[in-house]
Amino acid sequence: MSDKGFEPRIVAFLCNWCSYTGADLAGTSRLKYPANVRTIRVMCSGRIDPLFIISALQKGADGVLIGGCHIGDCHYQKGNYSARRRAAITETMLESLGIDPRRFRLEWVSASEGPKYAEVITDFTRQIKELGPNPLKKGAAK
Amino acid sequence: MSNCRIGVYVCHCGSNIAGKVRVDEVARYAKDYAPDEVVISREYKYMCSDPGQDLIKKDIKEFNLNRIVVASCSPLMHEKTFRNATADGGINPFFFQMANIREHVSWVTEDENAATEKAKALLIAAIHRVMHHEALEKRTVHINPQVLIVGGGIAGITAALQIADAGNKVFLVEKSPSIGGHMAQLDKTFPTLDCSACILTPKMTSVGQHPNITLMTYSEVQEVNGYVGNFKVKVLRKAKSVDHEKCTGCGVCTQKCPMKAPNEFELNMAPRKAIYTPFPQAVPNKPVIDKTICTYYKNGRCKACEKFCGPGAILFDEQDRIEEIEVGSIILATGYDLKTAESLPEYGFGRYPNVFTAFEFERLVNSSGPTGGKIVTREGKEPKSIGILHCIGSRDKKYCEYCSRVCCMYALKFSHLIKEKYHDCEVYQFYIDMRCFGKGYEEFYNRLLKEGVNFVRGKVAEITDAALEPSEEGKLIMRAEDTMIGTVRRIPVDMAILCLAMVAKPEAKELSHIFSCSVGKDGWFTEKHPKLAPVSTASDGIFIAGACQGPKDIPDTVAQAGAAAAEVLNLIQRGEVEAEVVTADIEEDLCSGCRTCVELCPYTAITYNAEKKKSEINGALCKGCGTCVGACPSGAAYQRNFRDEQIYAEIKGILAV
């Protein structure tokens, strides 16, 4: 059930070298996208523990995004391979927890893909709006 | 964490942030959110300015602050600035956190309310996080003054000489048997018409004789390990089958060799032998044996070269070997290729013998080339008319969107060289725009306008030999729209020259993996910043120079090589640099010895200590990605400044608004 005025809160974990820089580029290029996504910088998408994602959803996030370098372009050679494997596990975990796995997304955004970052955020925000508020939120500790 | 005394600073960045985010409201919100911890919360016009930084330093003293949070631009921009200000104020620079409310908020959000809310969330996240920060000590690493340069074209040569002249040891690795690169193949250089070989050869010789330069030709870098200041490099030394110590370079072996193969240096327009030096001015001017065509390697017979070699330098048994070298910095100067003419079938290269590539023409017009400098068709006849086609593959969304930057100028040079030899030859330049941007370039264009060359503003769409009238019989017909007169023209010529796009080397992608730097969508190496760090890469200690970064002419290449050399000399002069601080480590007590992390580490920084049954991280090798931390099932691995509790605190804070 989606409220009309529902403005989701989405947490995005972005790797320092590609996606965070890509998000910066979207900024310097003054590309406009919805303000629903809040960013957390990590050095590499490989640093992201699936529990970070679960934790964000528990704490009331309506969606979680991971942004890393394209496969083959990881600044640390292969951290994004780990991110990709963990993303697959995360989706299974979310399902077994009764959370729609569409609330989670993994995207590759390079440092030069400011427009892609803006597109990803716009599209993911639209998707989360369609999914409605995170059902875990009622119980989420403030 | 009641002992935290946080100072919060919200930057206006002029109107860049304050134009969209209500900064006063954000600063007040922070104070109200955590009144016990946030001792002072200010907003200021430009936090990065000297007075802005002084504000932090003064507050640390006055309010006895022990944590600093700045909400301003991207940490990639000013994290260092504010960390330094924090340290100058007297507290550890890692008791600092930044919230990016410019690139991630004010510049990308339309609505003021939404922007203000988002800024609050990012600021509260930073406040939560900074409470969990810990003091970290900066480490320094020694810089090995030895330097590796990959690629022996004019970029690599220039950088090598500058660094070696300054008294440092340089290893220059070149894939082919000689240094010189593409510049060695050129005839004249625009716009001064200097003979290319005449200005290049002395530099090549200097490299060959320089006591500080170890020249590694016929070699390729296979593996690079380590980090800035301390790289370990494995170089594949392909078997030359000739002992260059003994060889005198007399050339008798080449004369006696019975096997012929196409000469790559002459674009296959002339033969070379199985034992060969690629061109007369080669450095080193000593031959190698091409095992793929040598009869001895094929069927065990011949050995003519060995028979006639006075000093006994032939080494048929020589094997490829790996040589390990240690260097502190690396310059990549691996150059470019021209787009293959076959990939543009509309221009008929290969189908029509008298369609030439620009490099073929360079050799054709060169007095040491296959025709001794005579411009002739493949049938050996003097051409009465020549078409020079600009932008073949360049400025073309089907192929390469970018401009290759050098073609207009060398096309003009070609016209001049043709007119110099055959005054009556009709020369047609087919161009989209004339781009003559460098020093003396426009003047050269103006000179050519007076030399009787025909300029047709229009790109040739197709070359055909299908004659529609007798005057076109036996000719190559250039079909182009002349946009000056607004009509499609058919111009028959005897010879066509394709100014092909400069493209990245096919191996650039693989090299980017070996050297941990990246390539852009067109395959050129990506610089750290397009304007302010044009020769640095994302990997510290690894620099780029010349056309491997993008199309450029010789003056720009030489300038860039000088810049890369200066960066390297800067590192050597400093002697040491700050090492990565945000490295990972393992808490021995918690480690179960499962070894999950060992496999994941891309830098082999983690080893398993069988005696203790624990995994251990070598801090010198760790680059701080944190992949091991994300995977550790027992929570034993941690990453400095990206500890689990720090990130959980950030998640909590970011969702508190």
Image (cartoon, coloured by chain):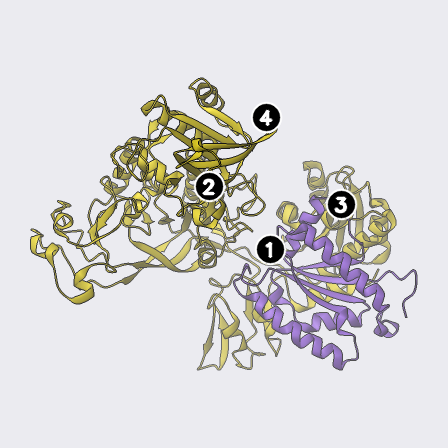
**Left or right of residue A113: residue B107:** right
Residue located at (16% from left, 59% from top): B315
Q: Residues within 10 Å of mark 3 (few under 14, many from 20)?
A: many
Q: In this structure image, what is the colour of chain A?
A: purple
Q: In this structure image, what is the colour of chain B?
A: yellow
Q: In front here: B185 or B159?
A: B185
Same subunit: marks 1 and 2: no
User: Dots 3 and 2: beta carbons under 8 Å?
Assistant: no
Going from N to C along the chain, the mark reached first, 3 or 4, is 3
Mark toward the viewer: 2 or 4: 2
Residue located at (62% from left, 56% from top): A16
Same subunit: marks 3 and 4: yes
User: Dots 3 and 4: beta carbons under 8 Å?
Assistant: no
Q: In front here: B337 or B467?
A: B467
Question: Which chain does the numbered disc 3 sit on?
Answer: B
Mark 1–mark 3 distance (CA, rounded to whole Å): 20 Å
Which residue is labeled 1 in the image?
A17
Which residue is labeled 4 in the image?
B484
Q: Amino acid at mark 1?
A: Trp
Residue found farthest to the front: B470
Q: Residues within 10 Å of mark 4 (few under 14, many from 20)?
A: few
Going from N to C along the chain, the mark reached first, 3 or 2, is 3
Q: Label 4's element?
A: loop
Which residue is labeled 2 in the image?
B466
Which residue is labeled 3 in the image?
B107
Q: Label 3's element?
A: loop
